[in-house]
Image (tube, helix red, strand yellow):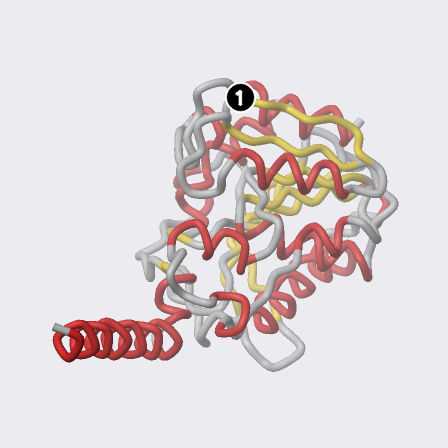
Amino acid sequence: MLRGVLVAAGVVVLVLALLTGLLWLFQRSLVYLPDAGPVPSAADVLPGGRDVVLRTDDGLELGAWWVPGRAADSPAVLVANGNGGHRGYRAPLARALRDEGLAVLLFDYRGYGGNPGSPTEEGLARDVRAARDYLVEDAGVPGERIVYFGESLGAAVVAELATEHPPAGLVLRSPFVDLASVAAVHYPFVPARALLKDRFPVAEHIARVDVPTTVVYGSADSIVPAEQSRAVADAAARLHDVVVVDGADHNDTVLLDGADVVGATRDLAQ
């Protein structure tokens, strides 16, 4: 009997070791879920939208959409996407923000929307800097007139950017504490903190950023638990507001272009 127990335990250990190894090897395929497109032209989905190109400091050219605001000096919203899809899926958000008079820049990370390269934490940091550079250098938007909007993984991207280039305000939609914390929810049997190549420490970054910060999340989020988004709000150095959308799950449209999301962004841009 003891031998049988030991054999069974050995099999369990072997399976767990194999599974852990596979997760380590393919982890970025689980974190990043790009859609290659095709991505339509900006003008086909966004009135007044223009196709533009962002250039990263490591030599990549990324597709993006620029939607000018109602006035020449309108505040601009830099939108950092979540880990799935491409910028086309965020067109309703851009349209709603433009209806409020705001300018909007939608872009795709490397490996998304037909862009070259493969996504990593370091790569996304380069990509979002290229997006900000476009706003400041090409579109002529002063840095103090830019609001960063980060959706889920994008919240981590803009939180890190804000530590170097503080914006007028930050909207973090469904943020997690860090990547290991949300991985532990979905893979509780894996030592995620020890294995992950990319960290995305949102709470750590936001504690260092002294700009008005609004956290928006759904109370029924099945991807990023609501308590993690609340923990990010608690960590913020300068919390402006917390907006809880009752009953909303992570990918519900009310968290894409709903009144609460749009209103929170408009509020920080004023």
Q: Which residue is at a point 53% across and 34% down the rendered structure image?
A: 226
Rendered location of residue 62, percent (x, y):
52, 66
Q: How many badges with numbers are in the image? A: 1
Q: Residues within 10 Å of mark 1 (few under 14, many from 20)?
A: some
Residue closer to the observer: 41 or 97: 97
Quadrant holding the N terminus:
bottom left
Q: Amino acid at mark 1?
A: Val
Q: Which residue is at a point 70% across and 52% down the rendered structure image?
A: 159
Q: Is residue 38 left or right of residue 253?
A: left
Rendered location of residue 138, percent (x, y):
72, 58
- Is residue 101 shown to the viewer in this render? no
**SS at mark 1 in the image:** strand
Residue closer to the observer: 54 or 168: 168
Q: Which residue is at a point 40% across and 52% down the rendered structure image?
A: 84
Q: From the viewer's perspective, is residue 119 above or below residue 36? A: below
- The single residue placed furthest to the front in the displayed view is 1
Rendered location of residue 232, percent (x, y):
68, 42
Residue that carries the numbered disc 1 in the rendered image? 245
Quadrant holding the C terminus:
top right
Rendered location of residue 63, percent (x, y):
49, 61
Q: Which residue is at a point 48% across and 74% down the rendered structure image?
A: 195
Residue closer to the observer: 254 or 36: 254
Residue closer to the observer: 230 or 36: 230
- Is residue 209 shown to the viewer in this render? yes
Q: Is residue 264 left or right of residue 35?
A: right
Q: From the viewer's perspective, is residue 4 above or below residue 75? A: below
Q: From the viewer's perspective, is residue 66 above or below residue 11? A: above
